[in-house]
Amino acid sequence: MGRELQKQPQQEMASAVEQLLAVNPYNPDILPDLENYVNEQVSSETYSLDANLCLLRLYQFEPERMSTQIVARILVKALMAMPAPDFSLCLFLIPERVQMEDQFKTLIILSHYLETGKFRQFWDEASKNRHIVEAVPGFEKAIQAYAVHVLSLTYQKVPRSVLAEAINIEGLSLDKFLEHQVANSGWILEKGHGKGQLIVIPPNEFNHPELKKKSSDSIPLEHITRIFPILG
């Protein structure tokens, strides 16, 4: 069935894999199909956490059939899904002896840098290991989107230099990126002190705490004072 699935269009392949998972997700016979589907996710820039977790579980039962290349691709795709916790979910299913291999140590380090917002260290480490991350199209854009997400939770106004470091873009490429964000995401550019440029991030409940839901949305205090005597 693996070869047949590989020839089908991506959408048909996705629905066929979904059916396999629904019928018998613990059947080792579907292992080649799931491996093919990982490669399909890479080439078509799609993603299925459920299928990838199922494959990792099957590898636990069939360790001699494990493909470290496939596992590495699953982990890279999981990194691209941040801030979702997919990387940790996948890593939990990977044997420790496999995690100790260099390429997986690298991916774990990259994950740590992303989780702690150390973007300069992340891009430096990624540049030393291009053979791992560049095997998966869309990796750079996905991480840049995550970096922007983190900055939007942290800043009301972000210096151009901080943004450049976080998304690993400079010069004219950064100008084009900013033009796109101004046109599509409501960013505003203004001059900072000296020659620096500041990017004004649209307000949200994290960078503008006053936008959080009013306390009236929670249980009124008088209701709580009525409840406690009853509980007593």
Image: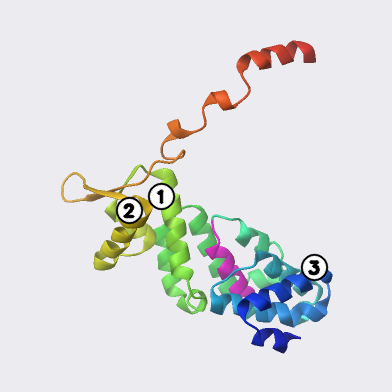
If the image is split into quadrants, where does the N terminus sit? bottom right
- Which residue is at a point 54% across and 73% down the rendered structure image? 45
Where's residue 121, x and y in %? 42, 61
Residue 44 visible in the displayed image:
yes
Q: Secondary structure at mark 3?
A: helix
The residue range painted magenta reads 71-82
C-alpha span from label 3 to label 2: 46 Å
Q: Residues within 10 Å of mark 2 (few under 14, many from 20)?
A: some
In the depicted view, which residue is nearer to us: 95 or 147? 147
- Which residue is at a point 54% across and 61% down the rendered structure image? 111
Residue 40 placement: quadrant = bottom right
Q: Secondary structure at mark 1?
A: helix
Please, what is the three-letter code of the amino acid marked with disc 2?
Answer: Val
Mark 1 in CB contact with mark 2 (< 8 angstroms): yes
Where's residue 94, x and y in %? 70, 68
Q: State left or right for residue 213 relative to residue 91.
A: left
Please, what is the three-letter code of the amino acid marked with disc 3?
Answer: Ala
**Residue 29 against residue 171 in the figure, above or below:** below
Q: Which badge, 3 or 2, comes first in the chain's sequence?
A: 3
- Which residue is at a point 39% across and 41% down the rendered structure image? 203
Looking at the rendered image, the disc whose residue lies closer to the viewer, 3 or 1, is: 3
C-alpha span from label 1 to label 2: 9 Å
Label 2 sits on residue: 162
Looking at the rendered image, the disc whose residue lies closer to the viewer, 3 or 2, is: 3
Q: State left or right for residue 177 relative to residue 205.
A: left
Residue 85 covered by magenta stretch: no
Label 1 sits on residue: 151
C-alpha span from label 3 to label 1: 39 Å
Label 3 sits on residue: 22
In the displayed orientation, state which residue is furthest to the left. 194
